[in-house]
Image (spheres, rainbow, N blue to C red):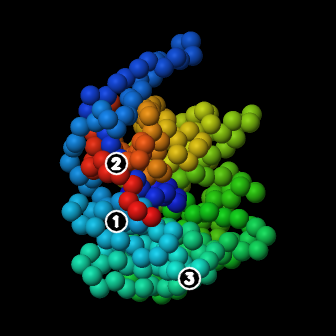
Amino acid sequence: MLVNRLATAVAALAALTLAPGLLTASVAAEPGAPQERRTAIRLDDLERGPDAAVPYRRHRTIQDGDLRRRIPGRQPDLLGEVDGGYLVTSSVDGRTTLRVLARRGGDRVLGTFGSRSRSFTLSDDARVVLMRLGGRARSTRFMLLSSTDGRDLARLRSPRSLWPLDVTADEVVLTSDDPRQVLSWSPGSGDVRIVVRESGGLADLDQDVLVRTPRRRGTQCLEMASLSSPREAMWSRCADEVPRLLSPDGQHLLVSERSWDAQDLRVLDAAGEQVARYRIRDGWGTGLVHFEDEQTVLLGVESGDAGAVVRCSGTHCELASGVAPHPPR
């Protein structure tokens, strides 16, 4: 999946680090339950591995191997790679600008929108980008735009609050909490249908995956299903966790504690079983999370006045970038 899945809105990436000689510890488990192995991540312990295989943003700068591109304006965000460069947003004079930063110059602005237009989701094939506009009360408006020239392809208005889970040129999966539903919008026809009467956390149209987020007896639960059979749960897990990211093949799910800068993250497989657990020590997460491949995750980590990108797979972690101090604001 592309960089924009991180979630739904990715925080500024700070320099991160990883370490191969990781510490592992047994975590107390309920009687009869298998013990969980937890890998501790400390920047000072990590050795340098290869650079991250995907571009990422550190504060106002896109880092892609040896290439550095600064995003103009304030509140910058990197949505992902598009043909010829990087799709980014930033705030200029109180308005949000959507633009393509070319790898070697020749930037182009796709559109400038009001200050409420701060939420964008790029499709996996990078053909379209969905813009969410908060309206009055709980209403929501969406615009589906071409990521090539910024053309307005379709619009949707709803009297309630909706959030996108996945986007393609032909279908957009949305979720709401009141009432709790997952919806499908067809931009071509304008039709909106109910997929399932339960809220969702993540979806992947290409892989036919839906992560539902029901509450059971006051606890946040996660349930894996398919978009084609959304009522049939393949597994259920109730541990007050937040679904953060699906792997490119839809077979692994990254979850975290409820806080955005969560320090405890788990990788679950297609059966809902934990295959890896990472705990950031003497630091905190920046919000950057990305699957580099089906089982390898990239994490943004900060400690003190420096940070780096950390790569983890199984119980092994290493630095996927240099450890660098915070740049000037």
What residue does disc 1 label?
62
Closest to the observer: 169 or 246? Answer: 246
Describe the element under mark 2 as helix, strand or loop: strand
What residue does disc 2 label?
308
- Quadrant in the rendering for residue 141: bottom right
Residue 169: give x, y in percent of width and height: 47, 74
Specify few, some or many for label 3: CA neighbours under 10 Å numbering under 14, 14-19, or 20 or more: few
In the depicted structure, whether residue 112 falls above or below residue 172 = below
Is residue 183 toward the left or the right of residue 290 in the image?
A: right
In the depicted structure, whether residue 8 falls above or below residue 295 = below
> How many labels, in total?
3
Please state which amino acid type lies under the numbered disc 1.
Answer: Ile
Give the alpha-carbon distance from disc 2 to disc 3, as whole Å: 31 Å
- Residue at (71% x, 55% y) in the render: 177
Please say if the residues under marks 1 and 2 sit with CB atoms less than 8 Å apart.
no
Please state which amino acid type lies under the numbered disc 3.
Answer: Asp
> Which quadrant does the C terminus fall into?
bottom left
Residue 39: give x, y in percent of width and height: 38, 29
- Residue at (51% x, 68% y) in the render: 75
